Image (tube, grey):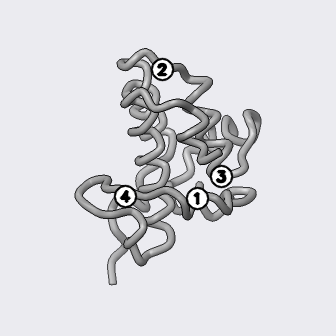
Amino acid sequence: MEKPRIFTMSFSSIYPLYLQKAEKRGRTQKEVNEIIFWLTGYDEKSLQQQIIDKVDLETFFKQAPHINPNASLIKGVICGYRVEEIEDELMRQIRYLDKLIDELAKGKAMQKILRE
């Protein structure tokens, strides 16, 4: 079976779209990065290296230091799918990140986004 196209897209091509979406609504790159750090365990240096290396999303999530155990608390609809019902683990992780960036752009407080 062929991989979904999103798995092979480079994180470096999607990251600016996350920034654009957040900044359009008055949020910051720092907040976008905080969400990515929380979800994946990357830090500033390792995130920048992933961007420089132009890794695809599959590699980005496979190389993530750790997926936050509270990620399972992320619920809701993104791209027409309930994130908690997505069976493919990689696709679910990608949609978790999409959902968190969506919540940021909608003005949700960081504490709620990071499931604190």
Mark-to-mark CA distance, 3 and 4: 18 Å
Mark-to-mark CA distance, 2 and 4: 25 Å
Tag 1, which secondary structure? helix
Q: What residue type is labelled 2?
A: Arg
Binning the other alpha carbons within 10 Å of mark 4 as few (below 14), some (14 to 19) or many (20 upward) gives some
66 left or right of 114 in image: right
The vertical placement of 115 against 12, above or below, is: below
Mark-to-mark CA distance, 3 and 2: 20 Å
Q: Name the residue under label 2.
A: 27
Q: Can residue 92 be seen in this view?
A: yes
Asked if the residue at tag 1 contacts the one at tag 4, i.e. Cβ–Cβ closer than 8 Å, the answer is: no
Q: What residue type is labelled 1?
A: Ala
Tag 4, which secondary structure? helix
Q: Nearer the viewer, mark 4 or mark 1?
A: 1
Residue 40 - label? 3
Q: Name the residue under label 4.
A: 6
Q: Which sits earlier in the primary sequence, circle 2 or circle 1? A: 2
Q: What residue type is labelled 4?
A: Ile
Q: Which sits earlier in the primary sequence, circle 3 or circle 2? A: 2
Tag 3, which secondary structure? helix
Q: Where is residue 49 in the image (x, y as percent from the top left)?
A: 69, 40
Q: Position of residue 87 (x, y in %)?
A: 41, 77
Tag 2, which secondary structure? loop
Q: Which of marks 2 and 4 is in front?
A: 2
Q: Quadrant of the N terminus?
A: bottom left
Residue 71 - label? 1
Q: Is residue 13 visible?
A: no
